[in-house]
């Protein structure tokens, strides 16, 4: 006999149940494969992307003033082993005459390069030639503008229209980052590269540049090159050298927490499918006891009977795993796109499916086998004597050891200070759930009786007839709902916490960044309509060494006389002006995140690479800020100019008056300064960015949890179908004494509703517990959140749980109502 054919025939006897059980494996495997493939790809791509996008050069030579002589570029080019390119950036207006395009949508950042085809720029031409003497735009910009190589584009520069041909269209790159459409151009300027001589001519900056990017030639000694560049900077006097630092830890500091949450949500699906498989096989074995007993009487051994059931499991596993891998491939692509979008990564490299395929196949095969272990054993242990005596199987008692083990696991979870606490906590919930389910149903039973009368009374009794099976079905839904309550509440709470600290530490209503600020700009800004007050501040990204790695630390120069009006940070128990006013020339205040990364203590020293070389600074205070995502140092403005050496400023903080809205304030300032403004960013923008990132991150996680909840719906349908098969004669008797089909449907629907209601109540309670536990340790950007429960979230999650249970109950209820009376009465 072919065991596969026998397994197929046995599964075909209960087609709907077998299909739903296999579907649960499909969803579990797909979610596991999708998460593993997408996360593993992200982990490999992110560092490479950062290196490719921001680490093309090894050093940047910059000036203490906004511009310096092009002769420096010539000197750098003569350094042995140096590959260099000079750069100059200015803002302009796109000359575009289409109606409906506003001035703010025409902003362009023009970047002039001494050479457009170098190992540093690494532009990848799609169309045209890089050394064609004209402008270079990305494929994204070309599509939005409807232009290509050979077409002409024009810019308005100081009232004069400057036209230039497009020499090349290149693949999208960070250097030429820009919007993808005219709509997005309201928020981000376009970026166009042109030959450096053109830039110098257009902006009357002959012989001037603002940066030199330097890369060590193949085989050149980077340390030696840095020494020669430092010597050159020391000789010139008005320039300094900064190494290019690709700081993966700072750029993606919250990625690991997000990935861990994804792993938990992804593996939740395959874990929940185990419950469905166990329930389905356990009932299948109970239904076929007479069959197994008959086979034993004609010579089949217990091992052969177990083999029959095992091949059924293997068949479902093989089919479910194969289909799950196919579905998971598409899911992996979707998740990868979402993850890259959330972290602002633009990469089109192929995905790494190896680990995802291996782990998903193992999970798809081993988890069903593990879940079927007890039912398979039961198939071999069927007693012929018990079957001949027609003894009824026990309804499924709940072992008392579960109570102790469940309490211990839940207790242990309080000592786990990471999202991994969900594992022992949810395992404990599974063990305790039969007790919780019985208690919940007994509490709800009077309401069922009073509200639904006969149908409610019968449904409540049926929920307790086989507590082990019914509670196992309910717990699947409960776990999923608990995770959704946690993730949705975290999303809401963190956004609110971010909003508070962002508005408290942003320094006003708007931060305006110019290419450089002229002496008269601050007075012009203060006279602009809607501006109540304004101040400028210097900012420099200094290099410091942490745990043997070089990092960039943004250092803000802050004035004690204005910091209380324009708060850039909060200090516990002290006014910001007290902190800044007390800082000496060699003292700084560190933000809490930077302080944690450093790992030192107040009173100890950090070393910053200043224009006069490396200098020690004593950390005298720890503050909280959301500037630069909460990773910064603050220095007294006067001491900043002396030690850091930067002689020009780019940023201005603005406070608006009550007569204008934030949007109107931006428009007024843009009308005043035009394309000289490189960027305007307000606290509401930062809240929006953070909110979108958090909502997107938790949305991806909740999407995976919802996939797992679909498995719970499958479990409810399967359980109700099993219950109906066991009670066919009972249903027939009810029909014979006058119970209508509508009442039968009502009873089955109420059973499913009861399963969902118990799952929702218990799941929401444990979800709230998860919220409390994570509030004691979880930090994102060094930001914690206060424990709180959103009744709106609980209500929506509760309605979702009820909806899943009702939809899952409809098919079994309809099947029960359609069972012919004559067939029901003779059913064995």
Image (spheres, rainbow, N blue to C red):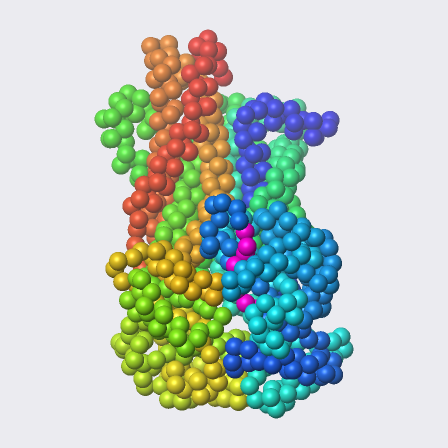
For the point 32% across and 68% down, which residue is it? 527
What range is drawn magenta here? 89-96
For the point 50% across and 40% down, which residue is it? 707
User: Where's residue 68, x and y in %?
Assistant: 57, 80
The total of numbered circles placed on residues is: 0
For the point 51% across and 85% down, which residue is it? 610
User: Where's residue 478, x and y in %?
Assistant: 40, 42
Q: Is residue 658 visible?
A: yes
Closer to the camera in the image, 167 or 226: 167
Q: Is residue 392 visible?
A: no
Within the image, what quadrant is residue 545 found in? bottom right
275 above or below 625? above
Considering every residue shown, the one lying at the far bottom of the view is: 235
Considering every residue shown, the one lying at the far right of the view is: 219
User: Where's residue 323, x and y in %?
Assistant: 63, 36
Within the image, what quadrant is residue 20 found in? top right
Q: Main secondary structure of the magenta part?
A: strand
Closer to the camera in the image, 284 or 631: 631
790 above or below 217? above
709 above or below 82? above
> Along the horizontal axis of the image, is 112 left or right of 106?
right
438 above or below 738? below
Closer to the camera in the image, 206 or 819: 206
For the point 56% across and 34% down, which residue is it? 23
* 817 in magenta: no
> Along the horizontal axis of the image, is 78 left or right of 574?
right
């Amino acid at each position: 006999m072919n065991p596969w054919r026998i397994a197929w025939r046995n599964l075909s006897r209960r087609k709907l149940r077998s299909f739903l059980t296999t579907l649960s494996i499909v969803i579990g495997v797909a979610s596991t494969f999708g998460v593993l493939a997408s996360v593993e790809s992200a982990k490999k791509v992110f560092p490479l992307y950062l290196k490719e996008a921001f680490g093309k050069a090894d050093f940047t030579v910059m000036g203490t003033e906004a511009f310096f002589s092009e002769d420096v570029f010539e000197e750098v080019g003569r350094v042995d082993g140096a590959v260099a390119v000079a750069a100059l950036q200015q803002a302009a207006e796109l000359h575009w005459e289409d109606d409906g395009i506003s001035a703010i949508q025409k902003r362009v950042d023009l970047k002039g390069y001494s050479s457009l085809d170098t190992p540093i720029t690494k532009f990848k031409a799609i169309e045209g030639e890089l050394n064609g003497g004209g402008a270079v735009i990305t494929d994204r910009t070309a599509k939005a503008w409807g232009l290509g190589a050979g077409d002409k584009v024009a810019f308005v520069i100081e009232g004069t229209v400057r036209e230039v041909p497009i020499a090349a269209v290149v693949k999208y790159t960070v250097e030429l980052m820009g919007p993808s459409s005219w709509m997005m151009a309201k928020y981000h300027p376009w970026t166009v590269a042109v030959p450096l001589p053109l830039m110098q001519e257009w902006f009357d900056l002959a012989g001037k540049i603002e940066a030199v990017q330097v890369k060590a030639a193949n085989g050149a000694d980077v340390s030696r090159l840095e020494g020669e560049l430092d010597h050159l900077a020391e000789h010139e006097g008005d320039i300094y050298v900064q190494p290019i630092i690709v700081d993966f830890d700072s750029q993606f500091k919250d990625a690991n927490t997000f990935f861990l949450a994804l792993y938990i949500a992804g593996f939740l699906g395959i874990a929940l499918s185990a419950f469905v498989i166990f329930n389905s096989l356990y009932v299948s074995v109970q239904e076929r006891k007479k069959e197994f007993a008959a086979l034993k009487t004609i010579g089949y051994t217990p091992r052969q009977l177990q083999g029959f059931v095992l091949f059924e499991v293997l068949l479902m596993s093989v089919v479910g795993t194969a289909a799950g891998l196919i579905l998971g491939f598409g899911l992996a692509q979707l998740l990868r796109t979402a993850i890259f979008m959330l972290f602002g990564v633009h990469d089109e490299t192929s995905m790494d499916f190896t680990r995802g395929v291996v782990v998903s196949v193992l999970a798809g095969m081993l988890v069903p086998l593990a879940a079927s272990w007890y039912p398979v054993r039961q198939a071999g242990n069927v007693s012929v004597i018990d079957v001949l005596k027609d003894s009824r199987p026990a309804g499924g008692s709940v072992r008392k050891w579960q109570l102790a083990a469940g309490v211990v696991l839940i207790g242990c979870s309080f000592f786990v200070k990471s999202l991994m606490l969900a594992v022992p906590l949810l395992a404990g919930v599974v063990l305790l759930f039969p007790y919780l389910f019985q208690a919940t149903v007994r509490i709800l039973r009077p309401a069922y009786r009073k509200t639904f009368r006969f149908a409610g009374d019968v449904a409540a009794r049926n929920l307790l007839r086989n507590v082990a099976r019914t509670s196992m079905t309910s717990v699947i839904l409960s776990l999923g709902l608990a995770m959704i309550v946690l993730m949705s509440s975290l999303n809401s709470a963190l956004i609110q916490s971010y909003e508070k600290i962002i508005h408290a530490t942003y320094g006003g209503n708007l931060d305006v960044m110019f290419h450089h600020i002229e002496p008269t700009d601050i007075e012009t800004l203060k006279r602009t309509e809607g501006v109540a007050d304004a101040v400028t501040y210097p900012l420099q990204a200094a290099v410091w060494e942490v745990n043997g790695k070089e990092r960039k630390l943004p250092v803000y120069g802050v004035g004690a006389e204005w910091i209380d009006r324009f708060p850039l940070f909060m200090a516990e128990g002290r006014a910001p002006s007290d902190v800044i006013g007390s800082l000496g020339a060699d003292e700084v205040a560190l933000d809490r995140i930077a302080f944690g990364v450093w790992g030192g203590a107040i009173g100890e020293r950090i070393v910053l690479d200043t224009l006069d070389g490396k200098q020690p600074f004593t950390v005298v205070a720890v503050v909280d800020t959301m500037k630069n995502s909460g990773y910064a140092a603050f220095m007294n403005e006067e001491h900043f100019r002396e030690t850091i050496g930067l002689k020009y400023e780019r940023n201005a903080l603005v406070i608006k008056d009550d007569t204008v809205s934030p949007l109107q304030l931006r428009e007024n300032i843009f009308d005043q300064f035009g394309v000289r403004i490189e960027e305007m960013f307000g606290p509401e923008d930062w809240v929006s960015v953070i909110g979108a990132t958090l909502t997107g991150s938790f949305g991806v996680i909740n999407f995976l949890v919802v996939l797992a909840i679909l498995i719970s719906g499958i479990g409810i349908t399967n359980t109700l179908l099993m219950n109906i098969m066991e009670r066919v004669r009972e249903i027939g008797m009810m029909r014979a004494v006058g119970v209508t089909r509508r009442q039968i449907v009502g009873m089955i629907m109420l059973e499913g509703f009861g399963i969902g209601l118990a799952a929702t109540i218990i799941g929401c309670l444990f979800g709230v517990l998860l919220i409390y536990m994570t509030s004691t340790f979880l930090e994102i950007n060094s930001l914690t959140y206060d424990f709180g429960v959103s009744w709106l979230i609980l209500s929506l999650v509760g309605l979702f749980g009820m909806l899943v249970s009702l939809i899952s109950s409809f098919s079994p209820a309809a099947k029960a109502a359609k069972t012919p009376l004559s067939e029901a009465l003779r059913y064995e």
